[in-house]
């Protein structure tokens, strides 16, 4: 599989250390981070046609990724 774009470390490079700390200290943040990575990798598999799905399914997954990213960004900025 090729490089998976939109990884959290790429999306928020300025918060790399903070993300690492929060994953260890906050079960909620760790769960959000894990869920984001699962959704992001699923989208990548869809885009690469490894797991083809309808456009509607892919769009819903993108919306879910964006919602998770927004929640993660809010936590990072307030921590």
Image (cartoon, rainbow, N blue to C red):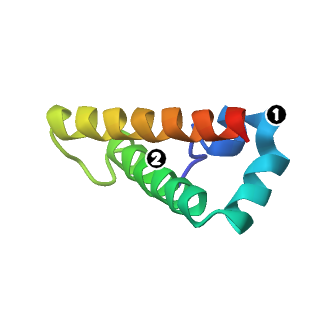
Q: Which residue lies furthest to the front in this view?
A: 78
Q: Mark 1 points at which residue?
A: 14
- In which quarter of the view is residue 53 placed? top left
Q: How crowded is mark 2: few (under 14 residues within 10 Å), some or many (20 or more)?
A: many
Quarter that holds the C terminus: top right
Residue 47 versus residue 79: which sits nearer the camera? 79
Horizontal side, residue 2 vs residue 9: left or right: left
Horizontal side, residue 62 vs residue 52: left or right: right
Distance in Å between CA atoms under marks 1 and 2: 20 Å
Q: Is mark 1 on a helix, strand or loop?
A: helix
Tell me: residue 9, above or below residue 26.
above
Query: Are the residues tagged 1 and 2 within 8 Å (C-beta)?
Result: no
- Taking the spot 59% from the left edge, 56% from the top edge, the residue there is 29
The x and y percentages for residue 66 are 43, 32
- Taking the spot 64% from the left edge, 43% from the top edge, the residue there is 8
Indicate which disc residue 2 carries. Answer: none
Tell me: residue 35, above or below residue 6.
below
Q: Name the residue under label 2.
A: 40
Q: How crowded is mark 1: few (under 14 residues within 10 Å), some or many (20 or more)?
A: few
The x and y percentages for residue 61 are 30, 41
Tell me: residue 57, above or below residue 1.
above
Q: What element carries label 2?
A: helix
The x and y percentages for residue 35 are 45, 57
- Taking the spot 46% from the left edge, 47% from the top edge, the residue there is 40
- Taking the spot 54% from the left edge, 60% from the top edge, the residue there is 28
Looking at the image, is mark 1 or mark 2 earlier in the sequence? 1
């Amino acid at each position: 599989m090729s490089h998976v774009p939109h990884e959290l470390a790429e999306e928020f490079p300025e918060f790399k250390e903070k993300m690492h700390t929060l994953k260890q200290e906050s079960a909620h943040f760790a769960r959000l981070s894990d869920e984001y990575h699962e959704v992001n990798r699923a989208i990548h598999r869809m885009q690469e046609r490894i797991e083809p799905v309808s456009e509607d399914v892919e769009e819903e997954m993108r919306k879910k990724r964006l919602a998770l990213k927004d929640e993660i960004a809010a936590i990072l900025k307030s921590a």
